[in-house]
Image: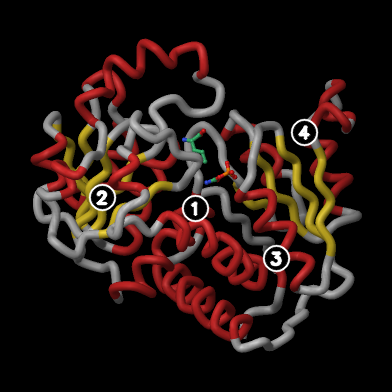
């Protein structure tokens, strides 16, 4: 059987992704009902994290514990990767010891190289290009609160970054309309935009993007690794702050989403992120349930 990876949302078929979302909801409900479910006893997930993380690290570690397995957290500096052992060799070695790997690093091509030489599933825990695990949780959150996301309108306001790229892929896979408002010099990747066709549109004006939206979503203006650009970015992004006035352009029952960590009064006002339309804590919680569904999909035989 060929091994499946999850490096972007495009690695799964549309039906597989939909099933994963509903399985995440089912797993969450069973857990809330107090059911113990340990399908990954004696299994090990290795986690190579080259960047900071609160949610991704904790949710994968807790998922493995609750599933009856183990997670090993590895910072590259503490492994031979940090001393120049080839990624290919690391992938071959880890394939013989653990059952799956989550990688968080800047370089998306490093994760692709690892996956190409891995005999076990590789999960992208965030690269500079994509953050697909977050989208599983975000779509799950919308489905739980409002029903199917197909045909809905999503507005992305802010940086054309890794999260924006994953929303573009989600629009393709789940067939919703995505309107993106970014400063000109921070637009998302043009190849990804071209592949998305007419489900994704670009705007200079945040109000135009948000009009009649079902979801308004943003992210930090300076991603990990861009700390030195903070001031320059803040100046360019100021008109793209999500505030209550902007939210009023969306549908009255629109949800506000943010993958977190958030910087209040930069990309979003406290009034919005701490207000009644915000579902950021549900998104964070759903990282656990959605990734359990993902681990199950990648590690257990499919019925
Ligand atoms: N949203 C997210 O991935 O958060 P962490 O960086 O804390 O993992
Ligand atoms: N765009 C952010 C997402 C953090 C979860 C970053 O890459 O830092």
Q: Is residue 144 left or right of residue 295?
A: left
Q: Name the colouring of the figure.
A: secondary structure
Q: Which residue is mark 1?
A: 134
Asked if labels 1 and 3 touch by Cβ distance under 8 angstroms, the answer is no
**Disc 3, SS:** helix
Work out how far the residue at label 1 is from the one at label 4, CA to CA, in angstroms. 25 Å
Instruction: Tell me, for residue 63, which label it has, or none.
Output: 3
| Point 75% across, 41% down: residue | 48
Work out how far the residue at label 2 is from the one at label 1, CA to CA, in angstroms. 15 Å
As drawn, 74 above or below 27? above
Q: In which quarter of the view is residue 244 placed?
A: top left
Crowdedness near tag 2: few (<14), some (14–19) or many (≥20) residues, C-alpha within 10 Å: many
Work out how far the residue at label 3 is from the one at label 2, CA to CA, in angstroms. 28 Å
- How far from the left and from the top, in percent, is residue 4? 63, 61
As drawn, 20 above or below 116? below
Q: Assign ligand 1 to one image quadrant.
A: top right
Instruction: Tell me, for residue 231, which label it has, or none.
Output: none
Which sits earlier in the primary sequence, circle 4 or circle 3? 3
Asked if labels 1 and 2 touch by Cβ distance under 8 angstroms, the answer is no
- How far from the left and from the top, in percent, is residue 68? 82, 73
**Disc 4, SS:** helix
The nearer-to-camera label among 2 and 1 is 2
Which sits earlier in the primary sequence, circle 1 or circle 4? 4
| Point 22% across, 21% down: residue | 184
As drawn, 241 above or below 26? above
Crowdedness near tag 1: few (<14), some (14–19) or many (≥20) residues, C-alpha within 10 Å: many
């Amino acid at each position: 059987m060929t091994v499946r990876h999850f490096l972007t949302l495009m690695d799964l078929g549309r039906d597989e992704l939909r099933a994963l979302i509903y399985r995440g909801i089912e797993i969450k409900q069973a857990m809330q009902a107090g059911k113990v479910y340990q399908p990954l006893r004696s299994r090990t997930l290795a986690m190579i994290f080259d960047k900071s993380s609160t949610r991704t690290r904790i949710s994968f570690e807790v998922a493995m514990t609750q599933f009856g397995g183990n997670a090993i957290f590895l910072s590259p500096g503490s492994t031979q990767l940090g001393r120049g052992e080839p990624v290919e060799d690391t992938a071959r070695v880890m394939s013989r010891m653990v059952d799956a790997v989550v990688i968080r690093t800047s370089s998306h091509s490093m994760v692709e190289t690892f996956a190409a030489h891995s005999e076990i599933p590789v999960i992208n825990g965030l690269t500079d290009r994509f953050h697909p695990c977050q989208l599983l949780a975000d779509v799950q959150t919308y489905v739980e609160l409002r029903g199917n996301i197909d045909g809905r309108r999503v507005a992305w306001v802010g940086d054309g970054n890794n999260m924006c790229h994953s929303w573009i892929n989600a629009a393709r896979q789940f067939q919703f309309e995505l309107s993106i408002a970014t400063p000109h010099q921070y637009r998302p990747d043009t190849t990804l935009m071209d592949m998305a066709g007419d489900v994704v549109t670009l705007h200079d004006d945040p109000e135009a993007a948000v009009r009649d939206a079902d979801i308004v979503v943003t992210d930090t203006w300076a991603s990990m690794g861009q700390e030195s650009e903070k001031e320059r970015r803040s100046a360019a992004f100021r008109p793209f702050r999500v505030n209550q006035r902007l939210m009023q352009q969306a549908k009255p029952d629109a949800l506000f989403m943010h993958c977190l960590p958030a910087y209040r009064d930069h990309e979003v006002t406290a009034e919005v992120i701490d207000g009644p339309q915000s579902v950021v804590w549900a998104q964070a919680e759903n990282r656990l349930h959605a990734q359990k569904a993902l681990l199950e999909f990648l590690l257990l035989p499919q019925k």
